[in-house]
Image: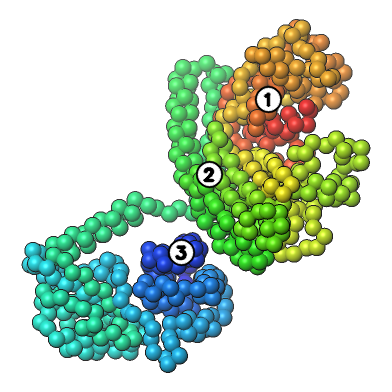
Amino acid sequence: MSEDFQEMFEEETREQIEKMNENLLSLEEDPTDLELIEEVYRASHTLKGMAGTMGYEGIQKISHRMEELFDDLKSEGDKVDERLFELLFECVDTIEVLATGEEEDYEYLIDELEDVISDDEGETKIDKTGTQLIKNADLPEKVKETLQSLSEKEITLGMIEISEDERLPAVRGIELREKLDFECEVFCPDPEEVDSDHDEFFVVTEEGLDKEDLDRTTGLIIDIKRDKGKKLLEEKKDETKKRKIATSDKLKVDLEDIEHVMNLISELVISKGSLEDLSNSLDSDRLSSVTKRIDRISGELRETVLDLKMTEVRSVFRRFPRMVRDIAKEKDKKVDFEMEGENIELDRTILERITDPLVHLLRNAVDHGIEPVEERKDKGKPPEGKIKLTATQKEENVVIEVSDDGRGLDEEKIKEKALEKGLIDEEEIEDIPEEDLYMFVFNSHFSTTDGVTEVSGRGVGMDVVKETMDSLGGDVIIKSEKDEGTTIKLTLPPSVAIVQAFLVRVGDGTYAISLEDIVETTQVKIEDIEKIKGNDFIRLRDEYIPLIYIKEEFEEDSSDPIKNEKEKLTVTIVSTEGETAGFVIDEVITEKEIVIKPLPENLQSMGGFRGATILGDGTIAMILDTLYWIETTS
């Protein structure tokens, strides 16, 4: 089997599985919702066809039985109970494994589905009345011509699908035609003229047609519609048009291919920087004009590719309701899980990288955050805990929050573990701010539970969250209140790789500051600097802003204070995550589009930098992590 076809099949199967999980979860809340039943029926039918084409017998058999079951449930939704949902979710999980080519026992699922479909006497309990056959079918030309000739008359259009399990479908078609006790305008195709595998037949008649008039034994799925001939034709045209609109303008592209194009654009941006430097040095109007044109084209190309990489967070969010449900059941807890902001868009690369961190946060919220039912009742809380996953847009950034109304973080246990691991001493721990104390849970293997389970305490997996956020240039904050709950906020850049930045000189080095963090650059007189609790501040529009002397941080052998060297200081005012500070620099070199390159692994732990960039002359400039410097020097 071609690898391309296999990948396509796995992707399509994954989409159908996500739809099934989503609809089954909603159906569990309202088992009588016929639209949801129809959606799962349709997904099962689609999976059956795909699996049959690719030769996945297990998936084909499971989805076929699920299709039969949901065909039954269209008219008898009251049969859906908790036991059936567990079976259906198990079927979906097994299909997911089988789709990867792995072996998995599935025969027992077929037997259990058969038990649900059939009664004790072995007679079918399913009313084989498919309500979507005609809608999804391509009508034969002979049927279309007949509908056209009877356009103003009330007529009945019927479609009969004979199960693939029947050995001689065409013979069943002949039997069916003979059992009809009225004159048919069309019985198409003629079962005597088709091969033995043909399994779809159409009936057109001016008479009314009751499903009871047709053979309803096992193996037949029947759909009937009655209307004016032209109405039935118009409905099919509309459906065809809708399908074309929905599919003709879509093209699936591998993320790896987009990343490759993005890398090429990154190289183009670096080369463009070299061309700009050359243009400035030669003072050529023609070269300057060409450089500006390349700058405009590369900018538009970058924006176009970034748009291609943007995707709604729902593509990841939709995986979590099923996970939360299963963990809650495993822990015997009741959880109401809500999601908001699923239409917010984020870079696909970032979205994929934060999937694991979100899994850890949600697992911890269910296992450690939400209390058992009895404990919640004792606290005067409703028995059902609430967990909320929210995405919002905040200026250029995307903020994702995971919140619960559970126990909240235990400050004393966190202090105890922090002291035990030597992360802080006893003198410092008494005065540590609450938000800094909570950050200890991001240390590797820092857990506030004594035992380890599959979904254990707050520290399990939390180091993954922090490491991922740091590597993406994002930020994470925890807010918690005892017995009220916990909120963990992830602030993410909308995209990575290329950003607008100021290049600044500090001492002998060149550094980059992201333009989105910069408020303004100003000149400050030495006499306007005020000392407050040993730190330097300037007053800007009635606000006191702390100064950060980057040169002193980078040049440890510098003995002379910077402010004694000049009458005025150049200060870049930076604001990020609600924190504002003034970075003292020597000069602003230029505003430039830069490519963010990750730091080598041996430098990632030193902090203070989001990455590095290559300048037009081939030199490297470090990209400042402004929030880091604000927090560590304040």
Distance, label 1 to label 3, CA atoms, is 50 Å
* Residue for point 71% across, 44% down: 480
Residue 539 visible: yes
Q: Nearer the viewer, mark 1 or mark 3?
A: 3
Residue to which mark 1 is pinned: 580
Horizontal and vertical percent for residue 411?
Answer: 80, 46
Determine whether, in the image, residue 292 is placed left or right of residue 476: left
Give the structural element (helix, strand or loop) at label 3. Answer: loop
Q: How is the image coloured?
A: rainbow
Residue to which mark 3 is pinned: 30
- Camera-nearest residue between 300 and 249: 249
Task: Identify which amino acid the numbered label 3 is placed on.
Answer: Asp
- Camera-nearest residue between 317 and 324: 324
Mark 1 vs 2, N-terminal side: 2
**Dot label at residue 346:** 2
Give the structural element (helix, strand or loop) at label 2. Answer: strand
* Residue for point 80% across, 10% down: 565
Residue 610, above or below 484: above
Mark 1 vs 3, N-terminal side: 3
Task: Identify which amino acid the numbered label 1 is placed on.
Answer: Thr
Q: Tell me the quarter of the picture where residue 296 sits.
A: top left
Give the structural element (helix, strand or loop) at label 1. Answer: strand
Q: Residues within 10 Å of mark 3 (few under 14, many from 20)?
A: few
Q: Tell me the quarter of the picture where residue 329 sits.
A: bottom right
